[in-house]
């Protein structure tokens, strides 16, 4: 383990306790300021996604430019993706929930990439069959968030390769091995699929411009660990004649164990709320979850608890506090000691169960149009 | 330039004077012995391709095993390819002429790969448009050699990627960067496309086995410079459950200038006979070609000439001596001094011109079925 002061954040490794301000400096990204948020809110018609209002999205690249372009009549599109290694948990939704919110307010196209090739290359223990099965399952969950079938397209890498590859050929020539070695920390044992892969994660950023024969800006909501891919993209964009994608970065959502980020594979199964968990598992996981509470009720009443380190508070924050007022009430109650952890968990469970039931229904509806959203043909031959 | 003793042979660099025996030892391949040739001839119905009979194919891997398998009822298939960087010259035909001869005698399927992605990655100066245009032009020339439309399929990489990629994903996971670095001499400036590419050159070796769900052996006639790709293939074959491909290797055909191999891009334009050269250019190139002749007629009559270093003799050897008797007559005349270089060139030109005219006609017929031979769909989804 690294020292407490040290942390590593790449698409293939997240460890240590992340200092988000230092990470912003390391990566050279911009802070999402109150002024920028106010502008976003105004262009969005007056409301703001909780994910933005509560600071989960905390950093960006060129968001201001993209929004001002939109205000002046230049439409953009959204792009985000998923490497399908297992079932989705609630933290995986963070990027897609923001995309859905933006699509609803700005009526822009959304491109979802399912990177079944990357996961096979990155995880020696997974079979192609498992990964492609999870790819479809994950896609249903993502579409179920409420994306507009008329505005939403999917690149399922192994099935969309004919659509992606002609542009990937051009992209890959621009990226030397030395770049991926430095950016992703690859070593000589890294397989040549994973070495190549970042070219395919770049392609969707340029694809609508390529398809439409004009410059279409791209906005990517993603976990900050994915930023390295798009630094590479941004470095080569101009040389290929395409606009640099803009990004908004979310913090990593803490695991229910309180250690590290929620992870499909990293932690124990009880570290995350999977969308396909049965209700009894949800109850157990929430009841066992790490909180910011004190050792005794008496102490907590007297000193209050610490929301910033609490995995339960993180859930209220991302989506389960349905209003800003509710979120502030929970936060204040926690900090003052008036809200005890058991009560807080019960109240949260009253929201999680209906959320997952509604999600399961929406998922069945998403299955009816998922296949038709997958792009399989290139817009032009070369 | 390396010392006379040194030479380098990889798919991306051929330089120095090649010692084929040493190369066979370096690469660890087997000699094509007279016994093996006799067996090949017998299984082929009694005749032998000039390319085999005259020693242009000089080395192999597992050819004996493949032939004995065929004799016992295990069919194989042929695979060879072309990186389309410009027009084909006569030396490019060597591998496809052997394939065509084998297809005719053994009635086996032929898979031709046009590696337009690789050429774009390997040659910074070429555009995608140029390469894909040459890809089609080269394909017409190859098919014109007389391949059977019912038995011949084409992987045109950028257009066949949906057919190739699912298997390429599995192949690429087996190949670490360290392998391609060592085998191809890549360095950190090599682009990630070229790093990945060898996976796509391996796929056709396994594709029929994958498509048919049973083990189908593969025979690859190729220039010895392509052997490194298939060493990688052979190393990973068993781990993927496929048979190792067998190979037969041809020597590099000398340039008309006498220096190095015939090359589309390496030497001056007059170093090679392009299939699309006008008759006047052919005449000029042959008249100017380097021979093994002496400084004066008198000296040549007295001492004889040296066929082994002669670019004209190399043309007789590959295909223009229509019988073994004719080939031996030219060789003996050259060595004895009875055949002077001017006469020899005239006699060769009388064969080259009709060859190219007949080729141009066959090429027009090949255009009618080339598109239908291109494979665009995977045999199975994952």
Image (tube, coloured by chain):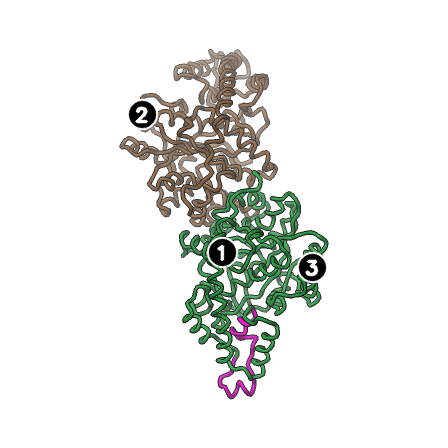
Chain colours: A brown, B green
State the residue at coordinates (61%, 70%): B54
Q: Please provide percent x and percent y for residue B79.
A: 58, 54
Q: CA distance from mark 2 to mark 1?
A: 65 Å
| Residue B64 disc label | 3
From the viewer's perspective, tell me whether residue A92 is left or right of residue B333.
left
Part of the protein shown in magenta:
B293-318
**Residues at marks 2 and 1 touching, judged by CB atoms closer than 8 Å:** no
Examine the residues drawn in magenta and state their main secondary structure.
Answer: helix
Residue annotated with mark 1: B366
Question: Label 3: chain?
Answer: B
Q: Secondary structure at mark 2?
A: helix
The quarter of the picture where residue B52 lies is bottom right
State the residue at coordinates (52%, 65%): B91
Question: Label 2: chain?
Answer: A
The quarter of the picture where residue A21 lies is top left
Pick whichever, A4 or A208, lies toward us.
A208
From the viewer's perspective, tell me whether residue B60 is left or right of residue A203.
right
| Residue A38 disc label | 2
Q: Are marks 3 and 1 on the same chain?
A: yes
Crowding at dot 2, Cα within 10 Å, few <14 / some 14-19 / many 20+, comes out as: some
Q: Please provide percent x and percent y for residue A165.
A: 46, 44
- Can residue B243 be seen in the rendering of this structure? yes
Pick whichever, B333 or B255, lies toward us.
B333
Q: CA distance from mark 3 to mark 1?
A: 33 Å
Q: Are marks 2 and 1 on the same chain?
A: no
The quarter of the rendered structure image containing the C terminus of chain B is top right
């Amino acid at each position: 383990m690294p020292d407490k002061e040290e942390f590593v954040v790449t698409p293939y490794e997240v460890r240590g306790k992340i200092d988000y301000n230092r990470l912003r400096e390391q990566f050279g990204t911009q802070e999402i300021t109150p002024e920028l948020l106010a502008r976003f809110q105004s262009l969005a018609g007056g409301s703001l996604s909780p994910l933005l209002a509560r600071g989960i999205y905390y950093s960006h690249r060129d968001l201001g430019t993209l929004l001002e372009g939109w205000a002046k009549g230049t439409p953009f599109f959204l792009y985000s993706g998923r490497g399908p290694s297992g079932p989705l948990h609630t933290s995986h939704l963070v990027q897609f929930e923001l995309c859905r919110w933006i699509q609803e307010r700005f009526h822009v196209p959304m491109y979802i990439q399912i990177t079944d090739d990357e996961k096979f290359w990155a995880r020696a223990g997974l079979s192609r069959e498992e990964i492609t099965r999870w790819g479809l399952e994950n896609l249903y969950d993502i579409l179920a968030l409420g994306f507009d079938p008329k505005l939403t397209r999917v690149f399922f890498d192994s099935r969309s390769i004919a659509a992606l590859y002609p542009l990937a050929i051009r992209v890959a020539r621009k990226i030397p091995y030395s770049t991926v070695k430095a950016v992703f920390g690859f070593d000589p044992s890294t397989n040549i699929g994973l070495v190549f892969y970042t070219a395919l994660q770049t392609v969707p950023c340029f694809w609508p411009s390529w398809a439409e024969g004009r410059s279409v800006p791209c906005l990517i909501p993603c976990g900050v660990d994915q930023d390295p891919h798009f630094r590479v993209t941004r470095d080569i964009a101009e040389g290929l004649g395409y606009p640099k994608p803009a990004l908004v970065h979310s913090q990593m959502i803490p695991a229910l164990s309180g250690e590290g980020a929620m992870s499909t594979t990293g932690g124990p199964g009880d570290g995350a709320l999977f969308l396909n968990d049965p209700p009894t598992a949800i109850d157990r996981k929430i009841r066992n979850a790490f909180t910011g509470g004190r050792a005794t009720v008496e102490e907590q009443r007297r000193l209050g608890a610490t929301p910033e380190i609490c995995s339960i508070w993180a859930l209220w924050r991302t989506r389960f506090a349905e209003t800003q007022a509710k979120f502030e009430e929970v936060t204040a109650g926690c900090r003052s000691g008036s809200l005890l952890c058991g009560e807080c968990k019960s109240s949260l469970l009253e929201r999680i169960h209906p959320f997952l039931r509604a999600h399961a229904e929406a998922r069945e509806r998403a299955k009816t149009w998922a296949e038709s959203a997958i792009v399989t043909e290139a817009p032009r031959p070369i």
